[in-house]
Amino acid sequence: MKLFLHRLLAAIVAAAAAFAAHADEVKVAVAANFTAPMQKIATEFERDTGHKALLAFGATGKFYAQIRNGAPFEVFLAADESTPAKLDAEGATVAGSRFTYAIGKLVLWSAQPGLVDDKGAVLERGEFRHLAIANPKTAPYGVAAMEVMRRLGVADRVADKLVTGENIAQTHQFVATGNAELGFVALSQVSGGANAQPGSQWQVPAELHTPLRQDAVILAAGRDKPAARALADYLRGAKAAAIIKSYGYDL
């Protein structure tokens, strides 16, 4: 019995050592709207594979500029499909590695109950001082917000009330703190488990803006990194899909 236990312990130690020997780190640039689900996915990814994902969150457009200027990111999770496609065309990615990991949803949200109605008519009434959006120059969710307002015919009417966040995370912060009475944010920021937040909201119909197809891609710096390929595979797996859907994204 003692011999069996000794051998079993030795096998466990050997397996753990092999697991650690193959563990790696991957540097990941992540669109700010995907912060909460990616943090959860990264935890599960490390537990299941031994690889550690080092996450940085921000605006897609700013990440594009950083990547083109040599930032050492190895995987990029954008808030759109056009930015990874552009990096593809510029030879800054691993060819064939791009895929859609989520389809985002835009929501008009206020921390104040009753302020935002279920049809977004509050935009027409204009009974607010500040409306927050992400910077449309760098954030796809900001682009979508502008498309919605133009299609509703209220863009000019609310132009002097706009407060622009550097990214969708800062935009959400403006509304959450009351610095803006309402704002266009990602549905994932105000719904999904512990992320669910009180207030009032209007989930914007998908036909009012270009679909928020969010693509991931392995960057050139991750070409020879097993952890980069492992993360891309993991994002397409069942466990990641369940987490992504729990935050209100479509697949």
Image (cartoon, rainbow, N blue to C red):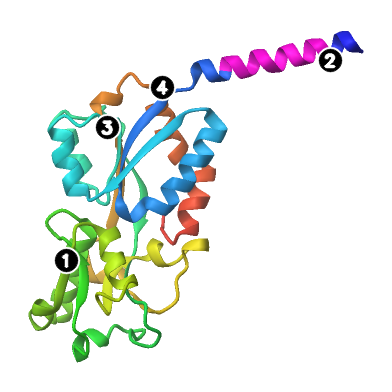
Q: Earlier in the sequence, mark 2 or mark 1?
A: 2
Confirm whether residue 30 shows in the render.
Answer: yes
The structure residue drawn at horizontal position 40% and vertical position 27%, both measured from the top left corner, is: 25
Find numbered disc 4 in the image and state the secondary structure of the residue it sits on.
helix
The structure residue drawn at horizontal position 36% and vertical position 52%, both measured from the top left corner, is: 34
Relative to 234, is 10 above or below? above
Q: Specify start and end residues of the magenta stretch as a single range.
A: 6-18
Q: Earlier in the sequence, mark 2 or mark 4?
A: 2
Relative to 19, is 169 above or below? below
- In percent of width and height, residue 245 lies at 47, 56
Q: Give the spatial CA distance, label 2 vs label 3.
A: 44 Å
Q: Main secondary structure of the magenta part?
A: helix
103 is within the stretch colored magenta = no
The part of the image, by quadrant, that contains residue 230 is top left
- The residue that mark 1 highlights is 164
Find numbered disc 3 in the image and state the secondary structure of the residue it sits on.
loop
The structure residue drawn at horizontal position 26% and vertical position 65%, both measured from the top left corner, is: 171
| Mark 3 crowdedness (10 Å alpha carbons): few <14, some 14-19, many ≥20 | many
Marks counted in the figure total: 4
Residue type (three-letter) at the residue carrying disc 3: Phe
- The residue that mark 4 highlights is 226
Residue type (three-letter) at the residue carrying disc 4: Pro
| Mark 4 crowdedness (10 Å alpha carbons): few <14, some 14-19, many ≥20 | some
- The residue that mark 3 highlights is 73
Q: Could you tell me if the residues under marks 2 and 3 are in contact, i.e. CB atoms within 8 Å? A: no
Q: Could you tell me if the residues under marks 1 and 3 are in contact, i.e. CB atoms within 8 Å? A: no
Q: Give the spatial CA distance, label 1 vs label 3.
A: 26 Å
